[in-house]
Image (spheres, helix red, strand yellow):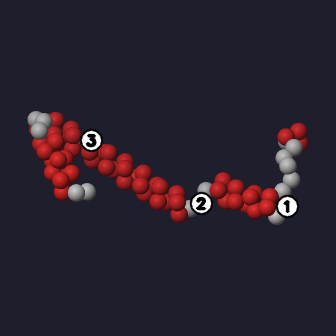
Amino acid sequence: MSSTAVMTLVKMVESPPDAAQEQVVEHLREYIAALQDELQWNATFKKTPSQSSVAARRAKKEIAEGRATPLDHRQL
């Protein structure tokens, strides 16, 4: 983050009364923690393909190789 953005944020947090500043800081802590969790989840998700992604790739391969058969919903 640029120093200008940080300075703007500091000025915004300093403007309300002290009690309100504490609330703002707590909200920012919660927001940043949630954002970090989301970023970590996204990074983990990108590293580990889901079972549906693996199954979809396998199905595409089987279709391309002519080994797939159309699904007959009456047989379910």
Disc 2, disc 1: CB below 8 Å?
A: no
* Residue tagged 3: 27
Quarter holding residue 56: bottom right
Point 18% across, 57% down: residue? 3
**Identity, as a three-letter code, of the amino acid under mark 2:** Pro
In x, y percent, where is residue 35? 37, 50
Q: Which mark is residue 66?
A: 1
How far apart marks 2 and 1 lie (CA) works out to 25 Å
In x, y percent, where is residue 26? 24, 43
**Identity, as a three-letter code, of the amino acid under mark 3:** His
19 relative to 53 in the view: left or right? left
Along the line of sight, which residue is nearer the eye, 1 or 51?
A: 1
Q: Residues within 10 Å of mark 1 (few under 14, many from 20)?
A: few
Q: Nearer the viewer, mark 3 or mark 2?
A: 2
Reading the chain from its start, which is encountered first: label 2 or label 1? Answer: 2
* Residue tagged 2: 49
How far apart marks 3 and 2 lie (CA) works out to 33 Å
Task: Reply above or below: 16 against 45.
Answer: above
Q: Which mark is residue 6?
A: none
